[in-house]
Amino acid sequence: MTYNLFTLSEVSASPKCILGFGHFNTIHPGHIRYLKHARNLGEEFIIALIGDSTEADYTFNQDERAEALNLLGIADKILLLEGDELDVAIKSLQPSILVLGNEYKNKPLIHETIDIIKRQGGEIQFHAGEIHYATADLLSASERELKQQRHELFRNACRRQNISVSQLSNSIDSWKQARLIVVGDTIVDQYAACEAIGMSAEAPVVVVRELEKKDFVGGAAVVAAHISALGAHCDLVSVVGNDANAETVTKTLSDQDIGNGIVQDPTRPTTFKKRYVVENQKLFRVSRLEDKNLDVKVEKEIIDKLEELACYADGIIISDFVYGVVTPNILKTVQKLSRKYNLLTFGDLQCSSQVGSVTRFKNFSLLCPNEREARFALQDKDSGLEQLSQSLLQITGSERLVMKLGPEGFIAYDRDPDGLVSNQAFPALSVNPLDVAGAGDSLLALFATALASGQAMMPSAALACCMAALAVETMGNTPISANALRSSLEEVLQP
């Protein structure tokens, strides 16, 4: 595709064109959704790009932003505005449709823009792009091509953030000084490898024969395991039952040198999930769990352990699967201890099959929701990703945010000392993942380890991107070591 950059002095009417508009200071999957939607509305798609002569303080100048838009391969032309004179662009181009993000609906001057385009016989759409929680990329390109594309996106993100290989490698070495506490729901994940025999004659169900099974620790326990494997010290504070699965957890903590802050509650089983797998394809899952809140005695034991360990820690991680371990009192204790000892706090609430809301975590150092969880928490299915993320930051008071987007990667948000929020998108490096179940846990573990050791947000995000790619390459939760991460980083950054 040939790209044309032009200015208002070079504009001629193009009545059948579709017009988009924005600053596109940092391009992330939310922008791409919006741009693809606009692209599909007509044969010619033009983007009116806001110039540098506005009051806004953009990280990148207009030439750099135009180059980034060009690389996407979505627009036919880019109109370089001097400022934000959208009205002049509309009068000159006379587009058939103007497409704006949902965030423009309540802008003060938008009514004037609507009047102009309607007088010209055009229409206006407010659209954030289609929301998808899966991808069909493998239908349009080979796995090798997609992998190369995503590696290039990763390298571009690192260049935009001035992140070097040596900087990332040196930061890994500093993690040995960090000490963290993980509190939350411990899970034992069992994978049963099966052979498909056929269909039952009694009912329309698949019949399989179990060949082999293997147990992995999951939930808060695997977050702790990742942190320990990365070289930092970690204590796990959680609850298990009085059963064989509890013994599996205890042995794993000992083998992986994780501090054992486990409380045993004989009134509830250790949370257990069994997945049946045929040829690396999961058929279904059976869960055995108790999701009521802890009783007062067990809750107090958890609080006592947190108070005992907090004075030695750099941060506390909450890994909440909404199975009852992270009670309101325990959450209040974590917040109290973070203020008392100046600890960083990291929160992840996973509610794929439970009822919960990440907004219960207030004033955390970092929150890591996925898009579905964020939309559920805010009861917002229409806003664009940027508006959604900014709303979540404002409502929770979180200092930083990672918006996880599954096969689209994630967007990292950071605040500078003046409170200004910046962001950067990072792609999902794994094109055809084997098991995505533990990707979020690995991401949380790395961000907490890196930030607790004093590392900045965006270099941490680059490493977390590589970490998640490693985590989905194996079936079951396998802790990722610092050496494995370093090797992966060198491979991805190698042109």
Image (cartoon, rainbow, N blue to C red):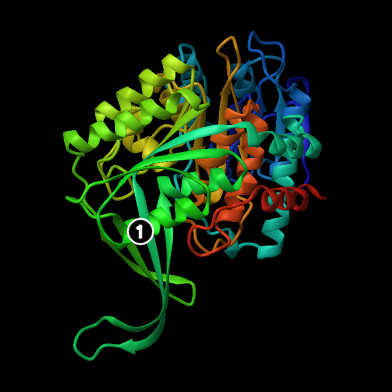
Number of numbered tags placed on the structure image? 1
Residue at (73, 21) in percent of width and height? 8
Seen in the image, is 8 located left or right of residue 441?
Answer: right
Quadrant of the image occupied by residue 452 = top right
Location of residue 200 with respect to 446 vertically, above or below:
below
Residue at (38, 65) in percent of width and height? 190
Nearer the observer, 128 or 398:
398
Quadrant of the image occupied by residue 177 = top right
Location of residue 332 with respect to 213 vertically, above or below:
above
Nearer the observer, 16 or 354:
354
Residue 88 screen position, x and y as percent:
63, 17
Circle 1 sits on which residue?
Answer: 247
Q: Secondary structure at mark 1?
A: helix
Q: Is residue 55 visible?
A: yes
Seen in the image, is 326 located left or right of residue 453?
Answer: left
Residue 230 screen position, x and y as percent:
61, 45
Location of residue 355 with respect to 218 vertically, above or below:
above
Residue 217 screen position, x and y as percent:
42, 56
Nearer the observer, 222 or 231:
231
Location of residue 63 with respect to 176 vertically, above or below:
above
Residue at (44, 45) in percent of width and height? 131
Q: Amino acid at mark 1?
A: Glu
